[in-house]
Image: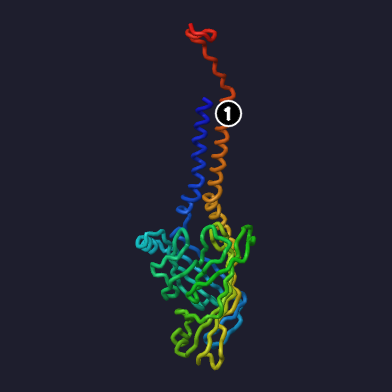
Amino acid sequence: MRRRASLVLLAFAVFFAALAPLLRWYAYPRLAKIPPSEYQTAVMEASPATLLDYGTMKPRTVPKVSIVQTLRGNVPAAKKVGKATGRDVVVWDTLSYVAGPDGKMVSKIPERYVFDAHSQDPVHAGGEHVDGDAVRRDGIEYKWPFLTEKRDYRYFDAQTRTSAPIHYKGTRDFHGLEVYYFEQTIPWTKVPLPKTMPVNGVTPETVRKAGTTRWYSTKRMFWVEPTTGAPVNGQEIHKEELRGGTLLGGRDRVTVFSGHVKMREDYIRHTVDMVKSQRRLVLLLTAYLPWGFLILGLALLALALLLEARGRAVRPPAAPAAPTALSVAGRSV
């Protein structure tokens, strides 16, 4: 019975020891993915800020400018792109809506971001765009990959429609989470005018006809939870200017917007709580279950060996063979 029990334990030990790497290296890459129906809203504020009054074409200091970012998963589009590419794809339709202190629109910029559900690599299909302009993204946007590494990444900047390095700057503690801190600086760059502007007679076409151009610079900061790759906080020191042309009344440049944009505290708390729950699910596949099964397999192996050793110790020694009738006292009969 001891031998039979040790064999059963040995079989379970092999099973759990083999299951541990399968979970980590086979199941996890296939199970960990972004759901196609994701929906998120975040509110960011710059308090105070400098904002251009398009009626007078003069910048003024305002108590607050709000940026509402909405992200919605487009399931039908994701299925269509997935069928065409043979990949597990997510399509995000996003909108950045900027409102002044009176709640009126300053600008709004829609985007479509198409990416691989598992790796977060961009997928160049399904009409990816920024404000209606077709783009071909290089690098990440909005979200880092699962199991984010301590290194630089390429991050897509929607204003310039280009990608640039975003630099890893160290590990920090944020609301009880260990996070990786990243920074990206975009130098002053000429960028397109928003296609939707405040309704007061100033349109992108009138600005272009006046020979005036729009310029932009920002310092972008993210606090990223590395297990999920989800940013739990984001900030920008954001500046925009109009330069040249006849629209500025002889001035060389005019500030359109300037402010330190920060995520509102209630949205930070909500994001941290959501990421903590998602983090546990990822760790279940990458650490808790694989290590648990490996330890269980080793424990079962040790128990099987122990039972086998005890079985051998208590087993009675074999009796000596009886002399045959043909051999007595060493002589043949």
- The residue lying at 52 percent from left, 75 percent from top is 98
The answer to whether residue 260 shows anywhere in this view is yes
Question: Of 19 and 226, which appears nearest the observer?
Answer: 19
- The residue lying at 57 percent from left, 35 percent from top is 302
Amino acid type, residue under disc 1 in the picture: Ala
Q: Is residue 48 left or right of residue 331?
A: right
Residue 166 picture quarter: bottom right
Expressed as whole percent of the image width and height from the top left, the position of residue 309 reads 58, 28
Total marks shown come to: 1
Residue under pointer 1: 309
- The residue lying at 52 percent from left, 27 percent from top is 3
At label 1, counting other C-alpha atoms closer than 10 Å, the crowd grade (few under 14, some 14-19, many 20 or more) is some
Residue 126 picture quarter: bottom left
Question: Of 161 and 324, which appears nearest the observer?
Answer: 324
Report the residue that reaches farthest toward the top: 333
Task: Identify whether 35 is placed above or below 132.
Answer: above
- The residue lying at 43 percent from left, 60 percent from top is 36
Expressed as whole percent of the image width and height from the top left, the position of residue 57 reads 54, 87
The answer to whether residue 274 shows anywhere in this view is no
Task: Identify whether 81 is placed above or below 197.
Answer: above
